[in-house]
Amino acid sequence: MANSDSATIDLVHSQRKKGYELFVMGVLILCSLVAVAVTVGIVLSLLFEAFRFFERIPLTEFLFGTQWSPQTALRADQVAAEGAFGAVPLITGTLLISFIAMCVATPLGLLSAIYLSEYASKRSRNLIKPALEILAGIPTVVYGFFAALTVAPLLRAGGESVGLDVSSESALAAGLVMGMMIIPLISSLSDDVINAVPQAMRDASLGMGATHSETIRKVVLPSAVPGIAGSLLLAASRAIGETMIVVMAAGLAANLTANPLEAVTTITAQIVALLTGDQEFDSAKTLSAFALGLVLFVTTLVLNVVALRIVRKYQEQYD
Amino acid sequence: MTDFITPSSQLKTRKSAEKRFQWYGRGAIIASLVFLVVMVGSILYKGSGAFTTTDVAIVVDLGPEAVDPANPQDARFEKIVKDALKARFPEATKRADRRKLYGLVSNDAGFELERFVLANPDKLGGEVRVWFRASDDFDILLKGTVDRTVDESERRLSDQEIGWIDTLLADGDVKRGFNWSFFTNGDSREPELAGILSALVGSALTLLVCFCFSFPVGILAAIYLEEFAPKNRFSDIIEVNINNLAAVPSIVFGLLGLSMLLNTFGMPRSSPLVGGLVLSLMTLPTIIIAARASLRAVPPSIREAALGMGASPVQATFHHVAPLALPGIMTGTIVGMAQALGETAPLLMIGMVAFIVDVPQSILEPATALPVQIFLWADAPERAFLEKTSAAIIVLLLFLITMNLLAIVLRRRFEKRF
């Protein structure tokens, strides 16, 4: 490049190229910021609308009130025109259904994970694992349909035959089916955790004469407990946020009860009930859905952050 | 066992505990799989009926008094059908009986006749045998869902109606065939006419919007995070964000769509545009995580070779690394799209629960999606909607299976192991 002309051209060319690359980088950064923008958008919109709700209904009433009957007043002077916005029955209902779901999913998911990672041959593992994953791939509306139209009537008939009064929209039906849905979540996460336990620990235990199951119960599982706890927390957060199953199978009766045979309602089911159909956007009724959404978002976020932290810390320990 | 020590009773209990423990594991897996089979099986069983349908032949009078050949569209088609039914079964004279009689055919029989007449003007002028869609009660009787032996008061159909149906059957005026209209009709209040076409098109439009937004943004974000992002707080925040976003309940995305897209930006309610955008925000984490994994799998030697030949980092990434990672990215995208296809809750929030008869023509028109249609039908009181709902679920599951198989095939065929 003796010629100074071509050197200038080259410089211009490379400057243009640099400008182009800067532009590309800008676009790339912008795209990765979309995820942050979504989170900020969620937080802002929930906070903003929930704040408007708490201007009308005090926060303490929302968090500690035990009556939930949101209504829109037909006349301004109507009795109980504002309705009652105590979220306690919704929170207990959500917890009850999630608890039933976890009672179903924890033993099934955990035992499946133990069997798959410790006992199953490679071939059967390759067959069973994807089969369990199918459960996770089925849309929740299908579970809801199954819970409402197959499981609930079965439970009702079964209850009748032994003299129990089972509500047709019982917490049990929704919880059972939801538990089935989160089995693969628990089993695949716990599977990873159990696999991460170093083989040397197993070998040591087996070498001391312990049977395989003794090794699992006394060595592998105790050292995998933090990771398993993390996976259970993730599953619980999934159960709390699950919507379609409870909308279709759990109903809208805001009962404050711990009886799984009665109908309860959940936060998500109420959000759907409040926001589908025609609505005026200024009523406390509509805005209360956002307050519920905020509760849901914060709860699941805390569960997730804690769970991910536990799992990660645990993984580092054995790496 | 020829051991030096004779097995003690303690060892025996330990061995049987071992066996028991293994069976707990097997039992858990079997229970989960049995549940899967029962659920899918019950839906297949319930839904299979919806793919066949029943038609009834009735001789209608299309003479000049009934239908004016000059303006056939002005005729009172509903009355013609009713008169034809009365002529077929003259014994029904009471009002209540007549109403039952008219209920043998679908409520839309008048429109069906109108369509028939306008399509076949040459048939005018006399009595013509026309096929009408049978009503849902008629249809499920033939499918055996209604038990004829139960007491009359507990059945949907009275003895008289069953008598008429048996007469029609004996005369060869009933035919059953594949229910094409399930795939070519929109939603309807009448289960025998309801179809999934409008919901399918709505789902397709929604997924299209979802793909057009989340695919490019997802890939570019993944490329930035994996190839260019410096290791600092800023990248950490983005990363934690994406992981948390993947676990946010789907209904919260619906709330975001409702308050931001609909109320703040004023986008059209119930439209596939809003639905697609909301779903794309949900699938974004899935795509980003999958794309990052497949970018990470491209060996550094490719990058280094490109850089060594004088390519800039951007060129090395876009010309060499990204193309190699594309199959993996596509697989992740398809899995994400399959999730989006099955998602219901956020769509309820943004109003895609409308009763949609017409096929949406653009992404700005009100539409519904297949899972939402399932939700709506599951709530419908008519017995016949039960099988329609199951049939719609079967169609949805078929789409999901196809998409997941596609993802598996893509991975098997194009994935390179370095």
Image (spheres, rainbow, N blue to C red):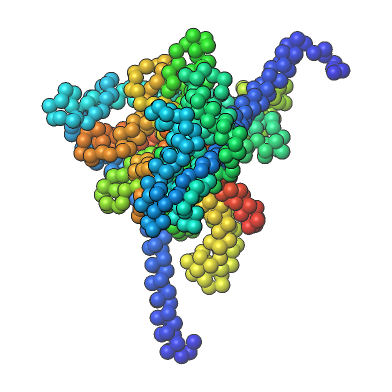
Where's residue B171, x and y in %? 60, 36
Q: Give whichever of B89, A145 is nearer the camera.
A: B89
Q: Which corner quadrant of the image does residue B40 belong to?
A: top right
Instruction: Give the total number of marks visible in the rendering.
Output: 0
- Residue at image point 53% right, 61% down: B322
Residue A194 visible from this viewpoint: no
Q: Residue at x 49, y 12 (%)?
A: A160
Asked whether residue A257 is in view, the answer is: yes
Q: Is residue A187 left or right of residue A60?
A: right
Percent x, y of residue B126: 48, 50
Answer with left or right where residue B78 lies relative to residue A221.
left
- The percent coordinates of residue B175 (x first, y second) are 59, 41
Q: Residue furthest left?
A: A77
Residue at point 23%, 40% (across, down): A281
User: Is B94 left or right of B292, judged from the image as shown?
Assistant: left
Q: Does residue A19 lie above or below B404 as drawn? A: below
Q: Quadrant of the C terminus of chain A?
A: top right
When asked about the image quadrant of residue A194, the answer is top right
- Residue B244 is situated, as x and y percent measured from the top left of the image, at 42, 42
Most foreground residue, B286 or A260: A260
